[in-house]
Image (cartoon, helix red, strand yellow):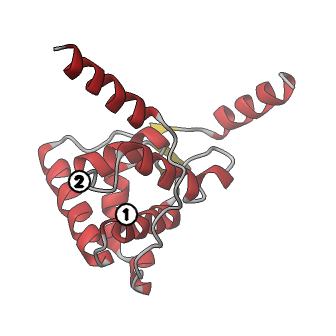
Amino acid sequence: ASAANEAAVKAAAADAEPVKAPLAPPCAIPGEMYTDPVLMSAFTAFATHVQNGTHSVDAAGWNKVVRACGLVGGSLSDPVATRIFHESGAGRNPHGRMMFAEFVGALAVVGGTHGVMFKVVEARVKSVAEKQKAAGTAARPVEVTDADVATKTSSSSAAV
């Protein structure tokens, strides 16, 4: 039993280790995906925040997307999914959340990681979003107001 415990501890430690290897190159993204209304609707269904009508997804929300869509597995582990989020460009946004264009790019990296075409990942994401909306289990994004942003900005600069 202690050997099994040791193996479980090693596996947990390996999962906690930051991913050092380079991410897989993204699969090709058909240009129309950046304006696809169904993919945009799927993104909205997974959104964790909305500000002035613009939806975004935070890191925890992104991890829920890849898990809910069954995209974690094989070479795409939870730490790799987290790294995809951080390398998507979300960190360059003042709020640190992924906007739609970064979401599309991150899905392409997921496709590259699994060695599949974009349409495979896209179909999975759209299907799961539609099922969640139909079941009433789609995300309920936090409404962020301009006042929230001003307060956060002034309090973070005051702390400096």
**Residue at the far top in the pictured view:** 2
In the drawing, does residue 107 fall left or right of residue 117?
A: right
Q: Which one is closest to the eye, mark 2 or mark 1?
A: 1
Q: Which mark is residue 69?
A: 2
Q: Examine the image and state in which quarter residue 104 appears.
A: bottom left
Q: Amino acid at mark 2?
A: Cys
**Residue at the far front in the pictured view:** 3
Residue 55 in sight: no
Residue 119 in sight: yes
Residue occupying image coordinates x 48% and y 68%: 105
In the drawing, does residue 55 fall left or right of residue 7?
A: right
What x and y, as percent, mark residue 114? 30, 66
Q: Is residue 12 above or below residue 44?
A: above
What x and y, as percent, mark residue 12? 35, 29
Q: Nearer the viewer, residue 104 or 48?
A: 104
- The crowding category of the residue bearing disc 2, from other C-alpha atoms within 10 Å (few below 14, some 14 to 19, many at least 20), is some
Q: Nearer the viewer, residue 8 or 90?
A: 8
Q: Check disc 1 and report its element: helix, strand or loop.
A: helix
**Residue at the far bottom in the pictured view:** 31
- The crowding category of the residue bearing disc 1, from other C-alpha atoms within 10 Å (few below 14, some 14 to 19, many at least 20), is many
- Looking at the rendered image, the quarter that the C terminus falls into is top right
Precedes in sequence: disc 2 or disc 1 = 2
Q: Is residue 107 above or below residue 62?
A: below
What x and y, as percent, mark residue 82? 46, 46
Distance, label 2 to label 1, CA atoms, is 11 Å
Residue occupying image coordinates x 40% and y 84%: 32
Mark 1 lies on residue: 110
Q: Check disc 2 and report its element: helix, strand or loop.
A: loop
Residue occupying image coordinates x 49% and y 62%: 23
- Looking at the rendered image, the quarter that the N terminus falls into is top left
Q: Nearer the viewer, residue 93 or 15?
A: 15
Q: Nearer the viewer, residue 73 or 154?
A: 73
